[in-house]
Image (cartoon, rainbow, N blue to C red):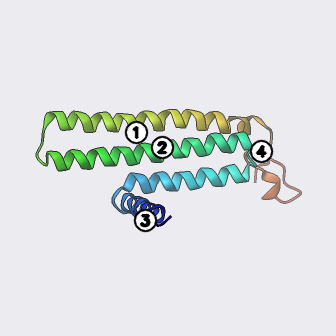
Amino acid sequence: MNKFIKSFGWAMHGLRTVWQEEVNFRIEIGISLAVIALGIYFKFITLEWIILIACIGAVLTAEIVNTVVEDLCNKVEPNHDPLIGKVKDMMGGFVLLVAFFVGIIGVLLFFRIFLEPNTFFQFSKFCPDNVTIGTTF
């Protein structure tokens, strides 16, 4: 059990390091929190939550793997090297592809919200009773 606790501690240290050193990771965490808030607001069903959490996990994991490979490349060859540059570019492409496809999944997840009337902007919550949508002020 002690070994498990130490392993967990090292893993948390790794996440803290990624948080401190990688701006993109912090941006992705912020976007993830915003999307989670939207999921709560729009009352996602269980399947939508499963898909959303899997997508968030995929993007964050891809960013961590990219960071690990880039750091290893920098350690192995601190000077500019065409092969190291190629590996880093491919890892950037990997993260871009994951984010792109997750974006498509996100659009599909939230698509129904835009189709249902008065779901996306529930003006009734914000407008006085005597104002109708489309009224010119």
For marks 1 and 4, give the CA distance: 32 Å
Q: Do residues under tags 1 and 4 come within 8 Å of each other at their CB atoms?
A: no
- Of label 1 and label 3, which has the lower sequence position? 3
Most extreme residue toward the left is 79
Instruction: Tell me if 132 is positioned left or right of 112 in this view.
Output: right
Q: Do residues under tags 2 and 3 come within 8 Å of each other at their CB atoms?
A: no
**Residue 19 falls in which quadrant of the image?**
bottom left
Q: Which residue is mark 1?
A: 95
Q: Which element carries disc 3, helix, strand or loop? A: helix
Foreground disc of the pair 4, 2: 2
> Label 3 neighbourhood size at 10 Å, few (<14), some (14-19), many (20+)?
few
Q: Which residue is mark 2?
A: 59
Q: Do residues under tags 1 and 2 come within 8 Å of each other at their CB atoms?
A: yes
> Label 1 neighbourhood size at 10 Å, few (<14), some (14-19), many (20+)?
some
**Residue 66 falls in which quadrant of the image?**
top left
> Disc 2 residue type?
Val
Most extreme residue toward the right is 130
Q: Which element carries disc 2, helix, strand or loop? A: helix
> Disc 3 residue type?
Lys
Which residue does the image show at 63% across and 39% down from the upper left?
Answer: 51
For marks 2 and 3, give the CA distance: 26 Å
Q: Position of residue 43 (x, y in %)?
A: 76, 49
Q: Position of residue 101 (x, y in %)?
A: 51, 32
For marks 3 and 4, give the CA distance: 47 Å
Q: Which element carries disc 1, helix, strand or loop? A: helix
Instruction: Tell me if 126 is positioned left or right of 35 in this view.
Output: right
Q: Which residue is mark 4?
A: 119
Foreground disc of the pair 2, 3: 3
